[in-house]
Amino acid sequence: QQQVKQSPQSLIVQKGGIPIINCAYENTAFDYFPWYQQFPGKGPALLIAIRPDVSEKKEGRFTISFNKSAKQFSLHIMDSQPGDSATYFCAASLPYGNKLVFGAGTILRVKS
Amino acid sequence: DSGVTQTPKHLITATGQRVTLRCSPRSGDLSVYWYQQSLDQGLQFLIQYYNGEERAKGNILERFSAQQFPDLHSELNLSSLELGDSALYFCASSVGASSYEQYFGPGTRLTVT
């Protein structure tokens, strides 16, 4: 199965809240899991990524949690700001990184 | 700014026509990837070129073709265009043939009328 299932479709949080976006996959051969952030009219921008041998990775206010046994991973945005309002995509890659398989995306709105 | 450039930004054309989208990768990157983003299909991988050679193929239609030139820029050719081809087309680049970190350009919005 080459799919990555992402939820929720959209999310509204108050400024300072911690939005959580979840992704699930079936193919255990995936070995790289990035998150991309996309603003309207722009291309996806690489935000943070994790490998399956690590359970958590933090970069600034962004944290990926990875559960290998459940085949799930999630993005947490600490102290969210209105400037974080964007569409977030999870993705997965097979070894040799030829292509990224993307989730459907989550539209995040952070209210000020 | 990712360092990947794409032209044109917008393209409006009629059904049955042919268009060419252009991409210049980040300086030093040898791989170029093409993706299509549409409302119903999301972001879909089309094709990858590495140092001038086709490296991987995804859900690319036979009406579509791509190439990478000696200066590493790439072109995506779309022919016999249909209404359903209207989408955003992104180019991404990475350093090597199997590099996980892909950096996306700003995209070309294609509208087929």
Image (cartoon, coloured by chain):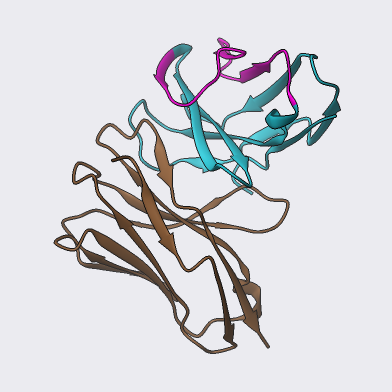
Left of B88 or right of it: where is B31?
Answer: left
Residue at horizontal 85%, vertical 22%? Answer: B14
Front in this rendered view, residue B59 or A52:
B59
x, y percent for residue B24? 63, 27
Q: What is chain B's hue in the picture? A: cyan
Quarter of the picture holding the C terminus of chain B: top right
Q: Residue at x 68, y 50 (%)?
A: A42
- Asked if B59 appears above or below A101 in the picture, the reply is above
Which chain, by letter, is brown? Answer: A
- Is B44 covered by the magenta stretch? no
**Residue found 30% across the figure and 63% down from its top:** A73
The answer to whether residue B32 is visible is no
Count all numbered tags in the image, as a single digit. Answer: 0
Check the image and report above or below for A90 versus B43. Answer: below
Q: Position of residue B55 (x, y in %)?
A: 39, 18
Residue A104 is situated, as x and y percent measured from the top left of the image, at 50, 53
Q: Quadrant of residue A29?
A: top left
- Expressed as whole percent of the image width and height from the top left, the position of residue B12 reads 85, 30
Residue A36 drawn above or below residue B60: below
Q: Which residues are magenta?
A: B54-82
Q: Is residue B111 left or right of residue B4?
A: right
